Amino acid sequence: MIDMRRTNFAVAFVSVIGLVVAAIPRDAAASSNSTIHSFGDAQPIDGGVPKGSLTYVNGFLFGRTTTTIATMPTPASTPVGSYGVIFHLDPDHVASSYSIDHVFAGGDVDDGDNPRHDAMTPFNGLLYGTTLDGGSHNNGIIFSIGQDGTGYQVLLSLHNSIGDESHSCFVVGNDNILYGMTAAGGAEGEGVIFSFNPATPTPTPTATPTATPTNFQTLFSFACASSTGKEPHGRLTLDPNGTTLYGMTRKGGAHDYGVVFSVDTSGNNYTVLHDFSGGDSDGATSDHGYVVQSGDHLYGMTTSGGHHNDGVLFRIKTDGSSFELLHKFGETHHDGKNPYGSLLLVGDLLYGTTANGGDKDLGTVFVINTSGNNYHRLYSFGGKTNDDDGAKPIDNVILVNDWLYGMTTEGGAHNQGTVFKVSPSPSRPRPTPAPRPTPPG
């Protein structure tokens, strides 16, 4: 496995600053370009086609890409293949700080391949993540890397019997255990809910330990042809009580459009809170999103469903009651369509992205109140032909120092995706010109 690290890594301890937005105007004007990095720019190696979101630690944004872009001839130290990278950058000094921390080498050397959705999970000075493929069984891995970009190591190679194809990362329990899900594997091959103890083995910069069964526990296996849901692609959400996990599945349920569920951290008391049925008044298929919690409400999105089958944003109580749609995407001209990711909750505001829709049908960034009011499109992506703008975001945004940051899967100078930055507040509406006076008759 190859680590490509910066030798001088400036560490700045910066806290994420919360945002308070007062009255939100009804009109939203997008700036002409959101790109702060085009994948493919870095030489001789860069990542491409990011399908996840970013993690902010110690003043730096960390992320992953699903492919590797290398100059030809490929540098001798680079793994043969296109398996993705881990990178970091300082959002205030992108060009001088952008760095590749690890180049995934794939299953031939028991490394990861194709890291997908969500953001790496910060915990105890490390970032934890997963890959969809790679590892000794080519069923994906669990890995860690230091929050300074060094010390990458494989912690566990997943395999079919315990769960494989992890599309997302983790939530950290009050017991310092990582909880996650896989989309396949387990008793009936439809995915699992699992726990992983990162304390044993203890990660070190020089070792690549092999986890024993005591490190990984399958808590719940999704059943084939199950009314309780199957094939989860998203992350889990931990209730403040510390013992209840919430999540969504991509398929299964009575209509095979997925479900919202709750389960104890022990794997017991699995309960379907909502069964998606599609159509005008319900959602369908959460591709890789997760729910966010505020009080006794959960908020989430589905890629399809709603009046035009362009996806919905919903709210439901944690006991499964009072399900309601807060927004149906694609209902208005140039609205966003088909949200693939999750929501960011800041106070009583929800931020998110859509993969399609907008002025050029290349995706949007939006904001809405938790009450379902004051929905605004904050940004409409223009793609490569629009000054190398991004296109097709399929995961959520994060808020750092009063700016929203995220990634797109397409667009940018090389059409390999971008890291973008947009304002969390709609632009002030342009004043309406006064009507011309009627000439005297």
Image (spheres, helix red, strand yellow):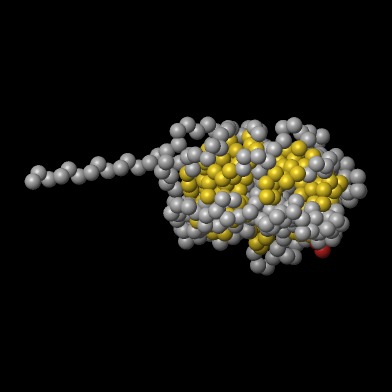
Hey, which residue is sitting farthest bottom in the picture? 73
Q: Which residue is depicted at the point 67% across and 57% down? A: 255
Quarter of the rendering occupied by the N terminus: bottom right
Which of the pair 96/67 is nearer the observer?
Answer: 67
Q: Where, by quadrant of the figure, is residue 392 drawn?
A: bottom right
Find residue 178 and report its horizontal and vertical position in percent: 79, 42
Please state the total of marks drawn on the protein image.
Answer: 0
Vertical arrangement, residue 307 with respect to residue 327, above or below: below
Q: Which residue is depicted at the point 52% across and 42% down? A: 367
Find residue 424 and report its horizontal and vertical position in percent: 51, 40
Hey, which residue is sitting farthest left in the picture? 441
Which of the pair 422/270 is nearer the observer?
Answer: 270
Q: Which residue is depicted at the point 15% across and 44% down? A: 438
Find residue 98 and report its horizontal and vertical position in percent: 62, 49
Q: Is residue 241 visible?
A: yes
Q: Which residue is depicted at the point 75% across and 40% down? A: 245
Vertical arrangement, residue 292 with respect to residue 354, above or below: above
Q: Where, by quadrant of the figure, is residue 74 drawn?
A: bottom right
Find residue 43 and report its horizontal and vertical position in percent: 63, 58
Which of the pair 24/46 is nearer the observer?
Answer: 24
